[in-house]
């Protein structure tokens, strides 16, 4: 700018020549030009504009023409705002300072909203006072717009975060955008569904433009933007002519939104006084992404809320279903248990021993089922908030000792110690007796289930303001990660080793609910390999209990007998009894099925694996009349038994402690010595998916409980039969393999022998020729017939050796063709000439018919071999009869026919004669190895052709060969 100012003709300006400028102006200009910051000078009452390089942005396209021109002309659009300020500085000599002031400027052809921080500093003139204004200015447009836009996005995010539905997000977004007209004169959000666009909200417009469909020529390119996912600028929007009305709009896709239901497109009007630069585009893109994110996250939350509500409803329905089913089950179970118990206790007409055992088995199963039904009913009452309890003041130590005492016999049978430490507490404790029974019985059953050695300790003591029950065992313990979920319903510790895998998974959850009803709390400590300790704390007194649930009557003297008996019975069922296989307590439970072997037959060994003793006894009773039966309580025990003595079939439950059915199956299939053992899985999981899972895992069969004895017996018998068939197939396969190896050894021997025979045979031929030449003429003539006979035998021997070599090459897959264009007619004629002597000796006359020379791409050596074999065969089986040879073409194929009038070939032998070492007639007078026709077929098929034999009219055999003339 310094150079431009020096070159300026100042005489033509209001300032006049530079020589006439006052010293203060010259000094101010020097300071301005030296300043690295934007600076301007407005001099005189006309405010003539001077500026440095850094301030050129103030003029835009008015640079450099605005240099030396009055402010009122250069910045006429800003004069109404800035003029009074400048005049005040000139009049008063007081500076003016403004920060982030909105100043309208026309810098680039349109009226623009600009923001500046500036200071107007009066510049003194020696004679007249204030001669002009020195201006220091900073353009803060970007900062102001950025802060304003950031505040908009922040407000949009905060408002949307408080919304729980998509509709609420849309309304909140609409409200925020409506308050941001400086940046967004109008906005429209569309959802594109099918062929229509639905307007979700609008701001800044009384109504949306007509033509909001997706058809071509609509107000906005909604479909194109949604499809391309690229924003588009629309010019001349709304048809407005006012300078303040938006003339441009940007259409943006909401790329983050879900496209499963609709595609969202945002239309925003552009403020005509704000340039559409990179910052503006970035802001609008951020706005679109913010809207998309808010809508999508809220939609996701809404869906999760709906799913949670649906799951809660399903859970409620499931609980109600369990409750209804449990109620319905109680009636038939009562009708079952009553007669069963009457039959077992009948002393006037007692059941026979075997029937008594069977009825006892059914009664124990029904008791266990009723116990599960009662647990489900109890739990559903808690779920529905309908638990019915009555609290009585009881001697809790005495009651606990009484309840635990029922398990002493079971503990002795299991080889465990049961220690009790329940001194008097000094005051009664308010409890519901039946609820306390359930708490104690569930904790004791759990301790028995997971304790194999050592013992159990039950203590009840007063600790502070609470009565504390502790049930400790020396069982398998639990990992730390399982403890937080232990009291959740249906939760079972993964991989836990117990006496049984059975259980509903609600026992401990029920304990927690019952303890909460008492205003107490339950906790657990456990460490793998050391055991577990469950702690129940009940507050003293009754102030924490509902007053309407307190009963001041005496506590019932008798508890729930069924609960007690069923709990003890379940524990006793986990303790091993006499080995089932050795016990005849249950006789045959099912009639024999067809094909089942009884005790007198060969039968087989069956291993039954189940952790339920009653089920093991039942399965044993079904199978023992037909097979030798062994049992195991879990997969690990079964695997050890398998490795000692592998059975013929394994019948295994799926869910068992230590090692389940699938684990046992994997172990069997991974053991080379056991992998062929058939295994039938038993499972309570019904449905095709469960069966497919079992079969895909490698099980041979999958049986869903409940099943009949006949069905189990039939499945076991089927697996035994299939196992025997597999064994027989394996034996047959071994025999075939041995036979193949023997044939291969023979072929190898023939190959070696043939090679070894060729050398002495060649020497023999040479010595015959040499000997014949060395004999005197008279003696040679006398021995000529004998020499000819010797040569014929040597030639025959050579042909046999060549046949053996061919056999070796074909059998080993080493037969190779060396094709070349061959005159087939000449080749056949040459073969006839060479075989003439042999044919004459057999008394055969030969006729050869070929219409014209025929050429084909064949292996001439192999084709000659084929012709010789066919001629030799004709001479052998048609001796003394004419032989006809025909050569011609059929389409693209060469046709060779050799006809004899001998004994012919029976229809049933026509395929067999092409086999290796096969002959048409198995009579000694017809020599040969039976290889000629087999080699002939191999040669023909190697060429891609075919060979067949048919009857010759009048008797004899006709061999027809078809060969492609061109190599395929």
Image: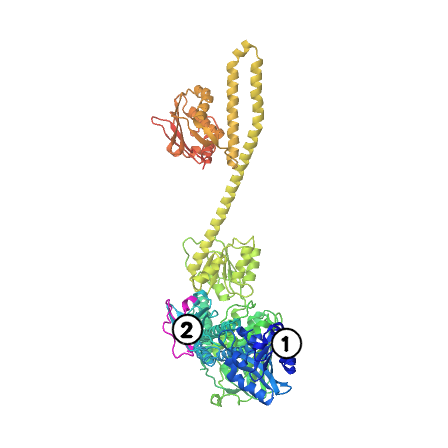
Q: Residues within 10 Å of mark 1 (few under 14, many from 20)?
A: many
Q: Which residues are magenta?
A: 199-224
Residue identified by numbered label 1: 33
| Residue 616 falls within the magenta-colored stretch | no
Is the N terminus in the top left, top right, bottom left or bottom right quadrant?
A: bottom right
Residue identified by numbered label 2: 237
Q: Main secondary structure of the magenta part?
A: loop
153 vs 952, left or right, is right
Please tell me in which quadrant of the rendered image residue 134 appears: bottom right
Q: Position of residue 266 (x, y in %)?
A: 44, 72
| Residue 223 falls within the magenta-colored stretch | yes
Residue found at x 53% / y 36%: 814
Q: Are marks 1 and 2 in contact (CB under 8 Å)?
A: no
Residue nearest the observer in this picture, 847 or 287:
287
893 vs 465, left or right, is left
Element marked by disc 1? helix
């Amino acid at each position: 700018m310094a150079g431009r100012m020096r070159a300026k003709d100042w005489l033509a300006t209001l300032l006049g020549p530079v020589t006439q400028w006052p010293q203060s102006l010259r000094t101010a200009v020097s300071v301005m030009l030296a300043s690295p910051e934007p600076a301007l000078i407005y001099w005189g009452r006309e405010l003539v504009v001077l500026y440095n390089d850094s301030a050129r942005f103030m003029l835009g396209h008015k640079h450099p023409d605005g240099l030396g021109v009055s402010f009122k002309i250069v910045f006429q659009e800003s004069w109404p705002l800035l003029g009074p300020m400048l005049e005040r500085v000139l009049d008063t000599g007081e500076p003016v300072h403004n920060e982030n002031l909105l100043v309208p400027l026309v810098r680039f052809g349109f009226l623009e909203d600009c923001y500046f921080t500036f200071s107007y500093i009066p510049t003194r003139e020696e004679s007249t006072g204030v001669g002009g204004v020195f201006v220091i200015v900073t353009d803060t447009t970007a900062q102001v717009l950025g802060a304003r836009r950031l505040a908009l996005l922040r407000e949009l995010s905060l408002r949307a975060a408080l919304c729980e539905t998509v509709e609420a997000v849309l309304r909140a977004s609409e409200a925020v955008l409506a308050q941001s007209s400086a940046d967004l004169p109008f906005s429209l959000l569309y959802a594109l569904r099918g062929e229509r666009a639905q307007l979700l909200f609008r701001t800044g417009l009384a109504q949306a433009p007509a033509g909001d469909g997706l058809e071509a020529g609509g107000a906005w390119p909604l479909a194109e933007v949604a499809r391309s996912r690229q924003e588009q600028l629309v010019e001349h929007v709304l048809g407005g002519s006012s300078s303040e009305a938006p003339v441009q709009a940007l259409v943006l896709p909401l790329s983050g939104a879900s496209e499963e239901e609709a595609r969202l497109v945002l239309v925003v009007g552009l403020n005509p006084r704000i340039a559409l630069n990179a910052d503006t585009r970035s802001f609008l893109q951020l706005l679109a992404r913010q809207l998309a994110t808010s809508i999508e996250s809220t939609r996701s939350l809404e869906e999760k809320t709906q799913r949670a509500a649906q799951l809660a409803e399903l859970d409620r329905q499931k609980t109600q279903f369990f409750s209804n089913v449990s109620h319905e089950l109680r009636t038939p179970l009562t009708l079952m248990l009553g007669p069963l118990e009457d039959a077992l206790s009948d002393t006037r007409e007692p059941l026979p021993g075997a029937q008594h055992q069977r009825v006892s088995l059914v009664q124990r199963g029904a008791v266990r089922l009723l116990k599960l039904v009662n647990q489900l009913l109890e739990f559903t009452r808690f779920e529905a908030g309908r638990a019915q309890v009555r609290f009585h003041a009881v001697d809790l130590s005495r009651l606990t000792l009484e309840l635990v005492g029922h398990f002493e016999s079971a503990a002795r049978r299991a080889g465990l110690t049961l220690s009790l430490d329940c001194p008097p507490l000094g005051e009664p404790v308010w409890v519901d007796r039946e609820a306390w029974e359930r708490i104690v019985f569930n904790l004791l059953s759990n301790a028995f289930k997971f304790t194999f050695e050592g013992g159990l300790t039950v203590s009840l003591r007063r600790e502070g303001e609470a009565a504390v029950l502790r049930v400790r065992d020396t069982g398998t313990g639990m990992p730390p990660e399982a403890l937080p979920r232990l009291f959740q319903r249906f939760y079972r510790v993964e991989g836990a080793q117990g006496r049984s895998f059975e259980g509903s998974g609600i026992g401990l959850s029920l304990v927690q609910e019952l303890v909460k009803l008492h205003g107490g709390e339950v906790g657990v400590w456990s460490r793998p390999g050391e055991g577990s300790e469950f702690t129940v704390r009940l507050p003293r007194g009754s102030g924490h209990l509902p007053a309407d649930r307190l009963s001041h009557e005496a506590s019932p003297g008798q508890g729930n007998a069924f609960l007690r008996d069923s709990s003890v019975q379940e524990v006793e069922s986990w303790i091993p009894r006499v080995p089932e296989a050795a016990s005849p307590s249950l006789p045959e439970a099912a009639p024999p099925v067809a094909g089942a072997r009884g005790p007198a037959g060969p039968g087989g060994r069956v291993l039954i694996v189940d952790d339920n003793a009653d089920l093991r006894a039942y399965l044993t009773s079904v199978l023992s009349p037909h097979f030798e039966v062994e049992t195991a309580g879990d997969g690990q025990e079964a695997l050890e038994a398998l490795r000692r003595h592998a059975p013929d079939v394994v019948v295994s439950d799926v869910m068992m402690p230590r090692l389940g059915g699938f684990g046992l199956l994997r172990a069997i299939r991974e053991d080379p010595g056991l992998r062929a053992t058939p295994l039938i899985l038993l499972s309570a999981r019904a449905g095709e998916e469960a069966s497919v899972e079992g079969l895909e895992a490698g099980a041979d069969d999958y049986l869903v409980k409940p099943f009949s004895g006949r069905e189990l017996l039939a499945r076991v018998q089927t697996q035994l039969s299939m196992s025997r068939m597999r064994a027989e197939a394996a034996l047959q396969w071994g025999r075939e393999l041995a036979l193949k190896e023997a044939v291969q050894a023979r072929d190898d021997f023939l190959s070696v022998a043939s090679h070894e025979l060729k050398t002495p045979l060649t020497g023999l031929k040479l010595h015959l020729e040499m000997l014949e030449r060395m004999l005197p003429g008279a003696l040679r003539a006398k021995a000529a017939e004998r020499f000819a006979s010797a040569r014929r035998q040597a030639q025959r021997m050579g042909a046999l050796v060549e046949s053996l070599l061919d056999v070796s090459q074909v059998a080993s897959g080493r037969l190779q063709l060396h094709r070349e264009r061959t005159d087939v007619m000449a080749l056949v004629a040459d073969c006839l000439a060479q075989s003439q002597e042999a044919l004459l000796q057999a008394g055969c006359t030969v006729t050869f018919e070929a219409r014209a020379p025929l050429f084909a791409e064949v292996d001439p050596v192999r084709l000659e071999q084929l012709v010789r074999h066919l001629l030799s065969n004709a001479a052998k089986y048609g001796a003394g009869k004419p032989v006809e040879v025909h050569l011609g073409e059929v389409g693209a194929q060469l046709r060779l026919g050799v006809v004899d009038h001998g004994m012919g070939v029976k229809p049933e032998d026509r395929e067999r004669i092409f086999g290796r070492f096969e002959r048409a007639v198995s009579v000694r007078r017809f020599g040969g190895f039976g290889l000629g026709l087999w080699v002939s077929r191999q040669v023909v098929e190697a060429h891609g052709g075919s060979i067949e034999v048919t009857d010759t009219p009048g008797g004899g055999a006709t061999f027809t060969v078809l060969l492609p003339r061109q190599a395929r």
